[in-house]
Structure formats: C-alpha cells, structure tokens
C-alpha cells in the first residue's frame, strides 16, 4: 500500500480475522480540520475480467466517543472508495495525483458497526461492484479519509468466473462474468470430439459466476454413445455380436449396447404383476404390429422369449377377439440347447392363429411367472387376407413373418427381423441378400444354416430420428427372383422423450422440449400447459418450456414413503374456449411427474456433516430497510412506511461468525399483516430470482444480499405499511449442489407499467 503519509501501518490483533497479529492501516485525525488522507493499493492486473468486486474489512470509532467538544462537525463515520483504471503500472508517490478528479468515486463506505472505545473492535465488511473499461489491463483502488477514526484490516479484490463446463456434449470455456451486476454473457459452445451440432449450443454466464439458460445442443455421432452428457465414446465393443458402422449388432439371444445381456426386454411397456424379480419376458428382437394371415389357414409366427435354463417359460393366449381361432397350448422350444449354466436362456414361442374373415383382429399373448401370475404381455393385430394361389416360394414361413406384415421399431433402438430361405441348389448359403430400397438403414447378417435345406438370416434395421413412419422393405436372393416384403413402422419420439423431470430440495425443475411436443400436438399453445393448477404456467425459451415452482406450490402432494420425501403432481395441457377463456373444453394431456429424495438431505443444525443449513440461532437471517442507495438512512421496520412510488432498499444479512458458509436468499415477499393469508403474498424474489419488474438485486456477498423495490400499498390499506419477509439457506462455500448456487432462470416478471 502507498499513502500520502496520513495513514499509519500498525501491528494489532483482530480476533474476528486471525489469532495472529495483523498489519493494518489506520487513520484517526478526528480533531483536525480539513483532513484529506489517501491510501492506494498496488497495481492490480485484471486478467481479462469485465468486472470486479472489492471486499473491505474495517473497524471505525463512533464520533460521539472520540470528538472534542465543538469539533464533532469535523468527525466522519465513513470513508470514500475510489478506483483508477489504466493499461499499465504507472503509479508513483505523486501520480495519479491525490484528488477526486484523477480517481473515480466507487462509493462512500459507511460503517454499520461503530466502536465505543479503542478496545471495542467491531468488524465491518462491505463489498462493492465495479464495471471495468474495455481494453485496460489493470486498476488501482484508493481510500480517502476525511476525518474518521478508521482501521483497514483487509482488502480483497476478486472477480467471478463461470468455470469451464461441458453441457449436452458442448464445451464452454471458463468465462469471466459480465460487466454489469445484472448482465449475462452468451457463450457459444464447441462440440466435444465425436459429436456434431444438432442445434447451435449456447449457454449464458451469469453475473454471479454460474451458468444458466442453456439452449441448443450437440449430439454424439453415429457409432458413439454419450457418457454423463460430457463425452462421446465409441459404442463398438460387442461381447456377443458384430460391429457394423461403429454399432454393436447383437447375436440372437443377446441384447444391450455391448451385447452383454442374455435375453433382453421389449421396446414397449407391458403388464408387470409377477412376484418374481425377473419373470419370463418377450425379448426385443421382433415386435409385431400387424401380421397378415390368410383366412381359414393356419398362420404361425415365432416370438423370442427368455426363461430359466431348467424350466421353460409358460406362454398363453391373452385377451383377443374370440372370432379369431387360436391353437392351444402355445408351443415353447429352447433356442440354444447348450444353455445350461446361465440364469436366462433364449426360447421361441410358436403362436398359431387362423382368421375366419377378411378383417382386423386384436390379439394379445402373455407370459406367466412360475407361480402362474401374469408377467409380460405383447399385443398386436392379425389382418385376415384373401387366400391367393401362389407357387411355393423360397422363403420359409415361419420363422419368416407372413408377407407384407408390419413390425414396430423405435428410432432409439436397433430392431431385429428373421428370414429363413429354402435352398434352391446344394452348397453354401448365399452370403448376401439384396435389399430394396438400397438406401434403407439395413444390415443383413447370415446367422446359420439350420439344415441342409434352409439358410437363416438376421435382418438388423437401424432407424434414425428422421426415418419415422412406415417404410417398405423387400429382400431377395441372387439365386431367385422372388421377393419377400415387410413394412417397418418407426415410432417417433414420444411424450416421455419430450419431458424431463427433476427437482432440488426446494423446487421442481421440469423441462419440456417444445420441438418434440409440437410434433405430437400440432398447434400447441404453451400458455395452456400448467403444473397442477392453471396459475402455474411455464416459462418459454427458444426451444423449451420450464417449470421452476416450489415443492409446496401448484397443488403438489408430498408424502413419506420408506423414510423418503416423495412429491407428486401432474402436467396438464388444457384446451380453452376461444371466446370464454375461463372455460376448459378439453384436456389433451395429463402427464404425472414425481420426484423424491432421502430425508437425510434435510439438515438440522446439530448435523454438522451436512453442507446445507437452515436459519437458526447460530445462523440468523436479518432484514434491514433503507430509504437511500447508500444504505444509511434506516426505515423502521414492522411494518415499513414509505411514499408510494419511492424506492425502498433492503439488506438481507446474517451475523453468523461461520465464514465457511455462504447465505443464499430463497424468497422475499410482503404481506399486509403478519398473519395475512398466503394468497396476499406479493413476491419480490422467488427461488432466488427477481419476480417483479421494479425489483433489482444490487449485490450478493457471502452473508449478505441487497435489493431494491418500488414501494406500493395494498388496496383498502392506505398508510398501513408493509411487512417484509425473507428466508434463506446456508451452504458450505465448497458446496456446488443446485440448491446452494444462487442461480436464476428466466421468469415472466410482473410489469407495473
């Protein structure tokens, strides 16, 4: 520090800061006229930051205790903080000159805690925000004393930075926070290796050094799979299958991304009422939708099913149109006779029906567990078709599905289909089958030669997101002109794909992908979607609809289940009358949402192992109100009174001595009376976010948040005042959990214009 000889460097003890002696700067010329003492910091390299915070810890004596009679007008209980920005270190004893023309005033810093005597050490902590000029590399700070008795204990200068982060496979570099306390910086992400832009990825670096309001994303390239939304790694490591175009194509009877699961599960949801953990289930290889069967002829299809090695699965007819003739019992054959030392083995269920008429029949088939309870169900349709006399073909039915049958397939999963051909001549099987159209995402693998007369093939269909809908596929062999054709119906993205549900300890975090939802509901009106009740509508961004309400709002139900807190609600899409908008004509969507977490997450102050604390005697939360921007002129509280339209400055702070914690303001609101009902609450801040157009968060430090709002009155309560309430949580400073970060997503703010 460099001074103009008015400040003195002394060694003293400040127990609130350190148990060791500290070097502090003091200035105490309260009985002198025209005091003008200056103290300047060394040159500070700003390192590319756009803004700085300066935190000053100091003590100050009360004027009434140290001034001589008649000299109190010269005494001050504040000092001035100045800054000087420059592109290099130019300072000397005389430059910049010690005056308020060379330096820019940051603020007049007043003490809130004043000592009665020299031994009465009351530490003040004040933090100020400074916007930096573009292109200048450094800054000096200067302290001007005009007649106080002050000791500067410590000065900390820092800036906030959004750390490097990877989000939706886009890398965002470490970014200094914006120039203004309420500004944000848009940063474009770079796709991580082995991924490509799906929609231009951008993230906003907020003024508090956190990332928020993400849009767009990168997606892993074909052949690569994502890990924690950060890395795209090759998915081509197959335990039981073959690698094709960086994708694992599993051998029959195996499933999973690495072909490491024996058997598998279907792509759709069936009934699950079995008492066993893993009852017999239909596997994912064939999911029929419509099977075309000739009328009055036996029509057999083979469905893969898994079961125990020593006890085959029981498969029975489920619910079906009883005009349809069915063959009972359903035959079940083991697929691999060598499967003896595994927990699950592949079987085949041979299902035979006969449609009596040319019409569409409903049919369901079920597996049973080993206590004969329903375990799994698969439903499809049987289309009766005219029996046309055709010469015998080379395709063998079954296991080949009947001609022009339709198979379901999801764009997110590889689909399998079996073909069996009769040999037209002795010798090996044709290694390749031709596929039309040739652009189809199909791989045909020769599986085995079932006998000297047949060749077995496995068709693997690899749908993409853009291939939804029905597609005709035809197969033929080089040894014959006959074709076998089928229809693949690729199911597009579902409602489950569009809605992501999570929650913090205090609020819902629901994100709806509007691009997907608009495909499902053309003409979607986002304002008609709400959580629980129609006042809880979402916040619309470019691509998403966000719901950030508290866990005790919007008719959310909470319950205790096995020691855990469970929260249940539903998303509703209601279609309103175009004229009488208060009338709902139709409910197009109800989507249940739920989340939960262990009760152990919630802390009391006796649990010192946790990082989240609530206000208590040790961690108090206090509120002070002021009529000036310097936070000097107190407004008496409970209730507060001001002129309508005037600004009220609020300081929410804690006097806890625990500097290993940081305070995060959750909500601030007014009520006309202390015991007024909740519907009269008027929120300034909710979930840490400004809720009112006239409310502005000015500054946030470790144990303090300052904001301003425009004073108003409740109807029929003229000159009756307002009661202001705020609550907060305390977190360990190292805790990066969502509830401990003072982040704010965009909200539809109330506008008073």
Image (cartoon, rainbow, N blue to C red):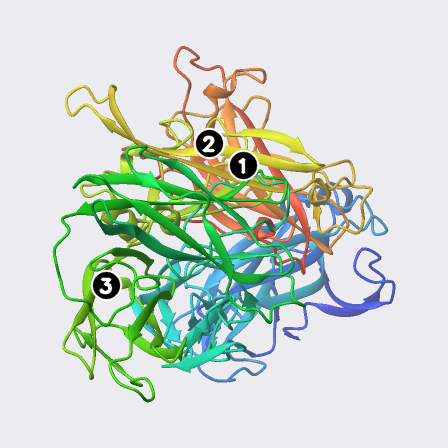
The x and y percentages for residue 257 are 48, 69
The x and y percentages for residue 492 are 28, 54
Residue denoted by label 2: 683
Residue denoted by label 1: 667
The residue drawn where x is 67% and y is 68% is 341
The residue drawn where x is 36% and y is 81% is 245
Q: Classify mark 3: residues with Cα within 10 Å, few (<14), some (14-19) or many (20+).
A: some
Q: Give the quarter of the figure containing the N terminus.
A: bottom right
Q: Give the quarter of the figure containing the C terminus.
A: top left
Q: Classify mark 1: residues with Cα within 10 Å, few (<14), some (14-19) or many (20+).
A: some
Q: Nearer the viewer, residue 134 or 222?
A: 222
Taking the image as shown, residue 218 lies to the left or right of residue 103, namely left
Tag 1 or tag 3, which sits nearer the N-term?
Answer: 3
Give above or below for 675 relative to 177.
Answer: above
Residue denoted by label 3: 467
The residue drawn where x is 36% and y is 49% is 352
């Amino acid at each position: 520090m460099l001074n103009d000889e008015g400040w003195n460097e002394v060694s003293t003890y400040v127990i609130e800061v350190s148990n060791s002696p500290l070097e502090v700067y003091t200035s105490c010329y309260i009985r002198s006229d025209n005091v003008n003492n200056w103290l300047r910091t060394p040159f500070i390299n700003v390192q590319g930051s756009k803004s700085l915070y300066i935190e000053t810890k100091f003590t100050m004596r009360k004027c009434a205790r140290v001034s001589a009679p008649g000299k109190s007008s010269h005494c001050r209980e504040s000092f001035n903080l100045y800054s000087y920005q420059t592109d290099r270190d130019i300072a000397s004893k005389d430059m910049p000159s010690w005056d308020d023309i060379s330096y820019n005033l940051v603020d007049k810093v007043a003490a809130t805690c004043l000592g009665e005597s020299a031994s009465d050490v009351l530490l003040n902590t004040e933090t100020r925000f400074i916007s930096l000029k573009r292109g200048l590399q450094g800054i000096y700070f200067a302290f001007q004393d005009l007649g106080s008795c002050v000791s500067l204990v410590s000065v900390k200068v820092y800036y906030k930075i959004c750390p490097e982060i990877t989000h939706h496979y886009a890398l965002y570099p470490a970014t200094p926070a914006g120039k203004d306390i309420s500004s944000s910086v848009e940063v474009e992400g770079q796709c991580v290796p082995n991924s490509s832009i799906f929609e231009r990825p951008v993230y906003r670096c907020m003024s508090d050094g956190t990332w928020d309001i993400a849009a767009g994303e990168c997606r892993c390239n074909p052949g690569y799979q994502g890990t924690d939304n950060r890395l795209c790694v090759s998915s081509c490591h197959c335990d039981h299958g073959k690698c094709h175009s960086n994708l694992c194509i599993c051998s029959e009877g195996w499933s999973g991304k690495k072909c490491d699961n024996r058997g598998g599960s279907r792509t759709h949801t069936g009934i699950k009422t079995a008492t066993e953990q893993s009852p017999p289930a239909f596997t994912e290889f064939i999911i029929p939708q419509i099977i075309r069967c000739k009328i009055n002829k036996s029509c057999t299809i083979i469905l893969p099913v898994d079961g125990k090695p020593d006890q085959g699965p029981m498969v029975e007819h489920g619910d079906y149109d009883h005009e349809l003739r069915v063959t009972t019992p359903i035959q079940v054959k083991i697929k691999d006779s060598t499967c003896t030392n595994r927990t699950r083995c592949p079987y085949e269920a041979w299902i035979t029906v006969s449609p009596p008429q040319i019409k569409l029949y409903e049919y369901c088939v079920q597996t049973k567990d080993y206590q004969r309870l329903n375990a799994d169900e698969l439903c499809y349709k049987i289309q009766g078709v005219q029996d046309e006399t055709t010469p015998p073909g080379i395709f063998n039915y079954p296991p080949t599905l009947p001609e022009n049958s339709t198979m379901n397939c999801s764009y997110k999963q590889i689909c399998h289909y079996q073909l069996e051909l009769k040999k037209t001549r002795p010798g090996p099987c044709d290694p390749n089958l031709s596929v039309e159209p040739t652009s189809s995402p199909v791989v045909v693998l020769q599986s085995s030669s079932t006998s000297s007369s047949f060749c077995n093939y496995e068709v693997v269909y690899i749908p993409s997101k853009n291939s939804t809908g029905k597609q005709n596929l035809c197969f033929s062999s080089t040894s014959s002109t006959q074709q076998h054709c089928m229809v693949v119906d690729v199911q597009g993205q579902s409602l489950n794909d569009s809605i992501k549900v999570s929650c913090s300890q205090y609020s819902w975090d629901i994100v709806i992908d509007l691009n997907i939802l608009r495909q499902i509901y053309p003409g979607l009106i986002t304002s008609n979607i709400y959580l629980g009740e129609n006042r809880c509508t979402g916040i619309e961004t470019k691509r998403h609809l966000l719901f950030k309400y508290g866990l005790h709002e919007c008719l959310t139900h909470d319950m205790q289940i096995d020691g855990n807190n469970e929260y249940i609600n539903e998303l509703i899409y209601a279609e309103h009358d175009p004229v009488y908008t208060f009338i709902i004509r139709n409910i197009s969507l109800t989507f249940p949402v739920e989340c939960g977490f262990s009760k152990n997450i919630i802390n009391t102050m006796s649990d010192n192992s946790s990082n989240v604390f609530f206000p208590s005697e040790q961690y108090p939360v206090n509120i002070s109100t002021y009529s000036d921007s310097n936070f000097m002129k107190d407004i008496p509280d409970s209730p507060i009174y001001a002129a309508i339209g005037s600004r009220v400055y609020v300081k929410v702070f804690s006097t806890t001595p625990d500097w290993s914690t940081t305070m995060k303001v959750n909500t601030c609101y007014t009520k006309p009376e202390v015991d007024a009902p909740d519907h009269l609450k008027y929120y300034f801040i909710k979930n840490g976010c400004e809720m009112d157009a006239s409310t502005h968060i000015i500054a946030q430090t470790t144990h303090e948040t300052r904001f301003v709002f425009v004073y108003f009155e409740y109807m029929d309560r003229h000159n009756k005042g307002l009661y202001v309430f705020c609550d907060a949580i305390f977190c360990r400073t190292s805790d990066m959990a969502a509830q401990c970060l003072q982040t704010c997503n965009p909200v539809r703010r109330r506008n008073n214009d």
